Image (cartoon, rainbow, N blue to C red):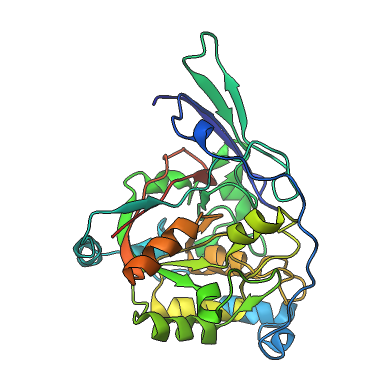
Amino acid sequence: MSWRHVTVAALVSGLVAGSIVVLDPQVRAAEPRPSAQQAPPADPVQSPGPSAARYPRNADEFDAYFKKVANWGRWGKDDQFGTLNLITPEKRKQAASLVKVGQSVGLAHVAITEKTPDNPSPYEHTMNRGFTSDTLRVSFHGYAHSHMDSLCHMLYKGQTYNGHATGEVNTEKGCTKLSIQNMRNGYVTRGILMDIPRLKGVPYLEPGTPIFVEDLEAWEKKAGVKVASGDALLIRTGRWARREKLGPWTIGQNEAGLHASTVQWLKDRGVSLIGSDSALDVTPSLVDSQALPVHVLVIAALGLNILDNQYLEPLGELAAKQNRWEFMLTVAPVPVAGGTGFPVNALATF
């Protein structure tokens, strides 16, 4: 495979667009296409307990919470890596020691080329002259395509992670700091899958279901694994399983995911990377004035990169079969200068 051209346009007020031209991807054409049928809407779930009363609830509480959890200056005023600093050589060696059977599973979902309620900007796949090469174009941020967010992707009050003014970082030519090019060497660490539907005995969480700290700790107890400094955390909600059964829905308006109250726990445990099978946040968010509070807190406050829209169904099946919920996780996005993120196929190896 060869790469000819990559451009990224940062639209920092919302979900950001990127475009890619790629030659000869070899596996996507043979994979089944998701149904374009729209799933019936689901009412937001307000459980367990009075979830709307969880802290933070409003703009003032969110602001105080942001300041409390922020890692600004923790690794120096010029730091570009955030929580990836927690992945030490010892952590990489620990991750490598988890490879027992030599079996890997990719976490990227098949490229979706149909326009659906959860995918307003599908992959555009065009065969070039002679049909021996092809062009792929995608606006990858959103709720459909598996990708990694860089630290210049989310802002709070006109600032990025580590307190840089957005006018100095987010420009029409790309991000001058905190871009995906900082990940050019990739990273390897211990990955942990938290399968919340399996915890609750259901095939998938209903849209709007919030995940709280007590759920994360209940899964640790059930799985016999404890999240520690430098670990990567992958949260399965069952989004893709529900989509396969019922069809796509407007997931940006109604999805299961983490509640903002979990972010302090993520900091305390030293999570180095986090991802999920959707866009991480529960929606509606249950925090007034913030549509994606977890995204804002994780990226702009903690300096924690996110893997969005990961295809965690095969990983969940393999982990359950082996009864092992920890593995070596490898992630290596293409280092686009100034990029707000990039599509990525992370690998979990057992």
Q: Residue 157's x, y, as percent?
A: 67, 64
Q: Look at 69% across and 91% down and name the residue there.
A: 49
Q: Look at 72% across and 66% down and name the residue there.
A: 291
Q: Is residue 269 left or right of residue 281?
A: left
Q: Nearer the viewer, residue 252 or 266?
A: 252
Q: Is residue 105 visible?
A: yes
State which quarter of the image contains the C terminus: bottom left
User: Which image quarter: residue 299?
Assistant: bottom right
Q: Is residue 251 left or right of residue 176?
A: right
Q: Residue furthest top?
A: 130
Q: Is residue 312 visible?
A: no
Q: Residue 216's x, y, as percent?
A: 49, 80
Q: Nearer the viewer, residue 195 or 66?
A: 195
Q: Residue furthest bottom?
A: 49
User: Which image quarter: residue 163?
Assistant: bottom right
State which quarter of the image contains the N terminus: top left
Q: Look at 55% across and 23% down and name the residue there.
A: 135
Q: Residue 155's x, y, as percent?
A: 62, 59
Q: Is residue 272 above or below residue 109?
A: below
Q: Is residue 128 above or below residue 288?
A: above
Q: Nearer the viewer, residue 32 or 175?
A: 32
Q: Nearer the viewer, residue 168 or 340?
A: 340
Q: Residue 183's x, y, as percent?
A: 38, 48
